[in-house]
């Protein structure tokens, strides 16, 4: 039996290193998602349409991208403040991947309209795609840094 002065102590918790690069990439991507939703997505006959315009009673996906951008931005802030939360980084990657796929689909729709109706593509959708890709890269950076 060990002496009474001896006590088993648990190992000291390892200090998590902050991953500010991942967080800032997610925040920057979220910002691009939100801003791209308000910029022109396409132009028909000198009239520009953003993601917030309704066309023929059909709403565009701009509000969805704003919501996804807000969610990714919150995940980025949480990652910046709380330092490398694995679940948050994985959730940000899933949301960013969804935004990226949806942005690519919307861009393909605009390209189809371009072929049939002479629509000119605007800067909004490419900005949304770039923002989603940037947020996904930030999430991956967070995962890679976490595994080290």
Image (cartoon, grey):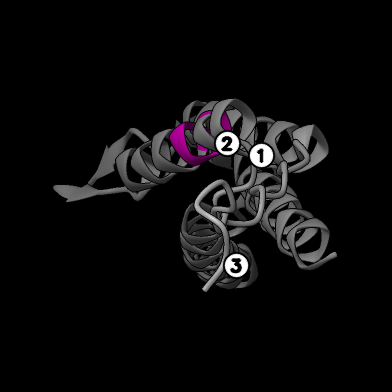
- Give the residue number, with chain letter if any, for mark 2: 76
The range drawn in magenta is 73-77
Q: Residue at x 63, y 52 (%)?
A: 132
Q: Residue 53, position in %: x, y?
A: 32, 34
Q: Residue at x 71, y 49 (%)?
A: 14
- Give the residue number, with chain letter if any, for mark 3: 104
- Whichever of labels 2 and 3 marks the residue nearer the N terminus, that label is 2
Q: Residue at x 62, y 63 (%)?
A: 114
Per the image, label 2 sits on a secondary structure element best described as helix
Is residue 75 on the magenta stretch?
Answer: yes
Report whether residue 46 is seen.
no
- Whichever of labels 3 and 1 marks the residue nearer the N terminus, that label is 1
* The C terminus: image quadrant: bottom right
Q: CA distance from mark 2 to mark 3?
A: 23 Å
Q: Residue 5, position in %: x, y?
A: 56, 46
Q: CA distance from mark 3 to mark 1?
A: 15 Å
- Whichever of labels 1 and 2 marks the residue nearer the N terminus, that label is 1
């Amino acid at each position: 039996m060990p002496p009474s002065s001896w006590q088993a102590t648990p190992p000291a918790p390892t200090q998590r290193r902050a991953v500010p690069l991942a967080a800032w990439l997610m925040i920057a991507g979220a910002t691009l998602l939100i801003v791209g939703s308000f910029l022109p997505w396409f132009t028909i006959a000198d009239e520009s349409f953003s993601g917030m315009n309704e066309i023929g009673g059909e709403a565009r996906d701009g509000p969805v991208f704003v919501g996804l951008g807000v969610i990714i931005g919150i995940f980025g802030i949480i990652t910046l403040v709380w330092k490398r939360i694995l679940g948050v980084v994985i959730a940000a990657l899933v949301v960013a991947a969804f935004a990226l796929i949806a942005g690519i689909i919307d861009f393909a729709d605009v390209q189809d309209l371009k072929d049939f109706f002479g629509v000119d593509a605007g800067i909004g959708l490419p900005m949304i795609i770039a923002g989603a890709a940037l947020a996904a890269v930030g999430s991956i950076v967070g995962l890679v840094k976490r595994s080290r």
